[in-house]
């Protein structure tokens, strides 16, 4: 079994087995990462994984979990950003049972 060395922010270099690591490979490569729980301090550690790191971890026996980034996440957004007031107004609007009933009946 391979021993994989990784660094923890608190403890420095630690030794892990492939089973100790989670490798998440994204369809949008810059969002790929690996994570582990530090065997010394118990901290959750998450680090970016470029193509080279992905190859090394897979060759070391770490199974890759492939995930797709939703296309909406990369869409260019137009218009002003939402504010806290916008969110509060939206929450108030959907909390109004009469308005929801009216909207539900509008499609009939």
Image (cartoon, rainbow, N blue to C red):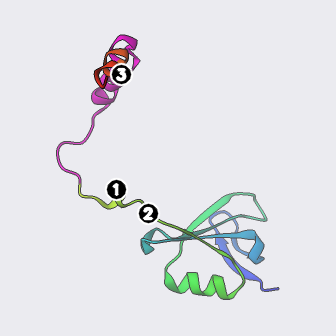
Marks 3 and 1, the one that precedes in the sequence:
1
The numbered mark at residue 69 is 2
Q: Are marks 2 and 1 in contact (CB under 8 Å)?
A: no
* Residue 36 in the figure: left or right of residue 24: right
Q: Are marks 3 and 2 in contact (CB under 8 Å)?
A: no
Mark 3 or 2: in front is: 3
* Residue 65 in the figure: left or right of residue 98: right
Q: What residue is drawn where x is 75% and y is 59%?
A: 41
Q: How far separated are the C-alphas under marks 2 and 1?
A: 8 Å
Circle 1: element type: helix
The residue beneath circle 3 is 104
Q: Which of the 4 image quarters holds residue 6?
A: bottom right
Name the image quarter holding the C terminus: top left
* Residue 89 in the figure: left or right of residue 58: left
Image: 105 above or below 61: above
The secondary structure that dominates the magenta segment is helix
Q: Position of residue 42 (x, y in %)?
A: 75, 58
Circle 3 Cα neighbour tier, 10 Å, few/some/many (<14 / 14–19 / ≥20): few
Q: Position of residue 28 (x, y in %)?
A: 42, 71
Which of the pair 103/39 is nearer the observer? Answer: 103
Quick check: is 68 in the magenta stretch?
no
Image: 7 above or below 98: below
Q: How far separated are the C-alphas under marks 3 and 2?
A: 32 Å
Q: What residue is drawn where x is 19% and y is 42%?
A: 80
Circle 1 Cα neighbour tier, 10 Å, few/some/many (<14 / 14–19 / ≥20): few
Mark 3 or 1: in front is: 3
Q: What residue is drawn where x is 37% and y is 15%?
A: 101
Residue sitting farthest toward the right: 1
The residue beneath circle 1 is 72
**How many numbered markers are drawn?**
3
């Amino acid at each position: 079994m391979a021993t994989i060395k990784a660094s923890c922010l608190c403890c420095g270099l630690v030794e892990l087995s492939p089973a100790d690591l989670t490798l998440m490979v994204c369809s949008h490569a810059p969002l790929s990462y690996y994570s582990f729980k530090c065997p010394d301090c118990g901290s959750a550690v998450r680090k970016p994984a470029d193509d080279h790191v992905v190859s090394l971890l897979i060759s070391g026996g770490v199974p890759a979990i492939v995930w797709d980034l939703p296309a909406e996440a990369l869409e260019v957004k137009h218009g002003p950003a939402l504010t806290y007031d916008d969110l509060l107004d939206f929450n108030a609007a959907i909390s109004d049972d009469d308005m929801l009933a009216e909207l539900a009946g509008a499609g009939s």
